[in-house]
Every structure is written in structure tokens, then in C-alpha cells.
Image (tube, coloured by chain):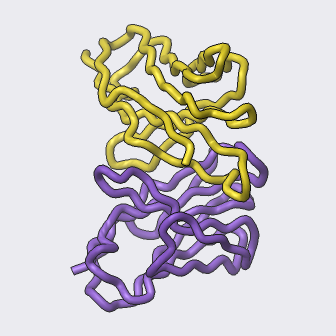
Chain colours: A yellow, B purple
Amino acid sequence: DAKTTQPNSMESNEEEPVHLPCNHSTISGTDYIHWYRQLPSQGPEYVIHGLTSNVNNRMASLAIAEDRKSSTLILHRATLRDAAVYYCIHQSSSGGSNYKLTFGKGTLLTVNP
Amino acid sequence: DVKVTQSSRYLVKRTGEKVFLECVQDMDHENMFWYRQDPGLGLRLIYFSYDVKMKEKGDIPEGYSVSREKKERFSLILESASTNQTSMYLCASSLSGFNQPQHFGDGTRLSIL
């Protein structure tokens, strides 16, 4: 299974930027990097995904290292509503499992007022 | 916005009962998924469907079956509920093709007594 490594928890202050790191040293050339988050009592929510280039959307930015063995999810201005567990996933393109997302334990982000 | 609706937020059933969990999506997505989420184990894929009447086993299909008679509806069936099936069940949907974001419902917390 595709494996990622993330810190168990991180803390931020409201309205400050947050950089959530992820290591995925076993990633292969065609695997995408996905980020999801899960707020308390809700299902996971898609945040962003990318392959090689940095990506931006209305929720966040994704910075991918040149060797693709790590990536960083950037929340530009954290709000209290961003407090959640953030999951970094690399989706394997091999065999018949290219639809599968393998969720790890994620990073619990706490946002202080 | 995509909406994935699970029929119940909380459900309590007895050992040996046949249990039906229902999921409906409103965005004409081809793919639908059932996961379960347990503390310390993350999300694990039970079954996946890529078209009406089509299904594939995920990582932990034992004790479960699924039904997809209509494109918008995907049902998870516990043939004979057991206490080790007490869990949070999450349904998701996505467009067909590799790397499409998955959209999740808010989950059904199922307790088997």
C-alpha cells in the first residue's frame, strides 16, 4: 500500500499561515498526491491534489518537492473552522486499485483563537 | 455542490440482524464507495462500484455485500451483523477515471449490540 508519513499533531494561531508537511518517499512517477481533511463528526472533505507542479485552489495551496518525495499543504490564513485532521494520500496508479485512497492517521491541526 | 446523503446518522442493531445502510448522491457520479472508520485503523475500503450493478471488493469485504441497482444509490448490507462490525460507515462518490476527488457523506455510526 502507498504509505505517507505526517506529524501526529500541529498547532497554529488564527489568521496565521499553516504549513502541513507530508513525506511520501515510496511514491512512483504517476502517483498523484491528495489531501483531504476531516472535521469533527463529518466525513472527509477533499482539499487539493497534484502531480508535480504546485497547485492552488480556493481552500489551500499544495507545494510538491522537486523529487516528489514530500509535499506541503499550505493554509494561507488559518481560521477556527480549519481545525481538523488532515490526511495526505498518494494514490497508486498500479494495477486495478487506481481508484483507492489509503488514509493514514493524518495530522490533527489545532487552531488557537 | 456535490451532496452525498447517508440515510441514518446513528443506528443501533442486534447481533444476527440483517442491516441495510443506504447512500444517495445527486451528481450523477459513476463511482461509489463504502468505507469504515475505526480508531487507530483509519478508513478502510469495504466495496466499490464503478457502474450500475457492478462492484469490486475492497480491503475488508468479509461479512458485507453491496447493491447498486440505480446510479445514484449504493447500499451496504451486513448479512448477519456481529459486534465487530460496530463502526463509523462512510459512503463516497466520484466521477469515473483516475484521480477524481471523492466526495463523502457525513457517516452512519452503527452499533451492534
Residue B42 location (% of width, % of height): 39, 50
x 34%, y 90%: residue: B17
Position of residue A32 relative to residue B84, above or below, is above
The image quadrant that residue B67 belongs to is bottom right
Report the front residue among B71 and B56.
B56
Residue B5 visible, this angle: no
Residue A100 location (% of width, % of height): 61, 53
Position of residue A29 relative to residue B57, above or below, is above
Looking at the image, the residue that sits furthest to the right is B97
x 30%, y 50%: residue: B40
Position of residue B28 relative to residue A86, above or below, is below
The image quadrant that residue A65 belongs to is top right
Looking at the image, the residue that sits furthest to the front is A26
Report the front residue among A111 and A107.
A107
Residue A73 location (% of width, % of height): 52, 21
x 67%, y 56%: residue: A97
Position of residue A16 relative to residue A53, above or below, is above
Looking at the image, the residue that sits furthest to the left is B113
Position of A54 with respect to A14 (left or right) is: right
